[in-house]
Image: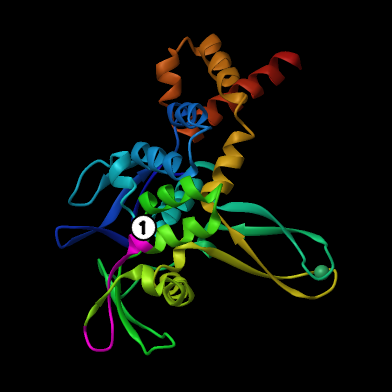
Amino acid sequence: MTDRAQIRLPGGLWLEGNCHREVILRSLRGRDEELLNESAEALPAERVSGLLACCVERLEGFGELTPSTAAQLTVGDREALLLHLRRLTLGARLQCLAQCSACGESIDLDLSVDDLLQPPYSDWRPEYETRCPTPDGPLQVRYRLPTGADQRAAALLAAEDLAAAQSLLLRRCVIEVRAGDGSLIEPEEVEASLLQHLPRELAERDPQAESILDFVCPACGAAGRVLLDAADFLFRELGSRRGELYRQVHRLALHYHWSEAEILSLPWSKRQRYLGLLAEGAEWTAS
Ligand SMILES: [Zn+2]
């Protein structure tokens, strides 16, 4: 399994009129897992920004990524990076559990990361315009797509008030609203109409932001859908291996006499390969 990949973001980061789209991404190191474990209590959006700052080695025309720049990437670009990171580190196949809403059957879905990745978007801009229908006639709305920073801000509110979180996200992404006669309108005045219209528009412009999987229930034949949140999926998967990291470092240090820093900077696949060799060695000794 290759440890690095050049990938093209579905969107790209807009900075001063230039779009930065090509990324060199590397797989997880023990050091990154350690950082993730230490940030287990932080908001998922913050953990994603921290992780991407570690694993994105270069953003074309920009250089290294800091957590605050990673937070400026759109939700879809961040999801795409996490899916690529999953593929580089643990492989492309993933199992996801879904439940049939018709009969309640639990279904194991066997997926490939490639099925979840969207091709680069053809119409990608720093901001968009749309006509939003209201009872008093259509509005002209300028908006941008939600980023990691928007997700973080909304998540701070979401635990207590989901509706407030939704309207905060909307307020952050709406740049300008004009009535039919061209006069400016405060977004708060037409929030209900915006909330009805804009989420669909955002999902169409950044489809990678939500990976929705269609399935057919093998028990009753009903069609179902499940949402896969790449961050949630990856953090759960890594969280379940949390206790293994230092045990692995211990085993490798004991046999190879590498320092902790050296072991924690090994690519995931290489660390597993050496552990595999040690396990084989143990079998030889035993037989
Ligand atoms: Zn069913």
Q: Which residue is mark 1?
A: 74
Report the residue that reaches farthest toward the left.
Answer: 16
Kindly tell me whether residue 10 is visible in this rendering: no
Tell which of 7 and 164 is nearer to you. Answer: 164
Q: Is residue 118 left or right of residue 19?
A: right
Res 32 → quadrant: top left
Against 224, residue 80 (above or below) is above
Q: Position of residue 250 (x, y in %)?
A: 56, 14
Q: Closer to the camera, 33 or 37? A: 37
**Horizontal and vertical percent for residue 213?**
61, 66
Identity of the residue drawn at 22% across and 81% down? 183
> Which quadrant of the picture is home to ligand 1?
bottom right
| Position in image of residue 136 (x %, y %) | 39, 88
Q: Secondary structure at mark 1?
A: loop
Residue span colored magenta:
171-182
Amino acid carrying mark 1 in the image: Thr
Q: Is residue 94 visible?
A: yes
Question: If the image is split into quadrants, where does the C terminus sit?
Answer: top right
Instruction: Classify residue 109 as left or right of residue 242.
Output: right
Q: Please identify the quarter of the rendering in which residue 96 is found.
A: bottom right
Q: Position of residue 90 (x, y in %)?
A: 54, 43
User: Which of the 4 image quadrants contains residue 122?
Assistant: bottom left
Q: Is residue 258 above or below residue 5?
A: above
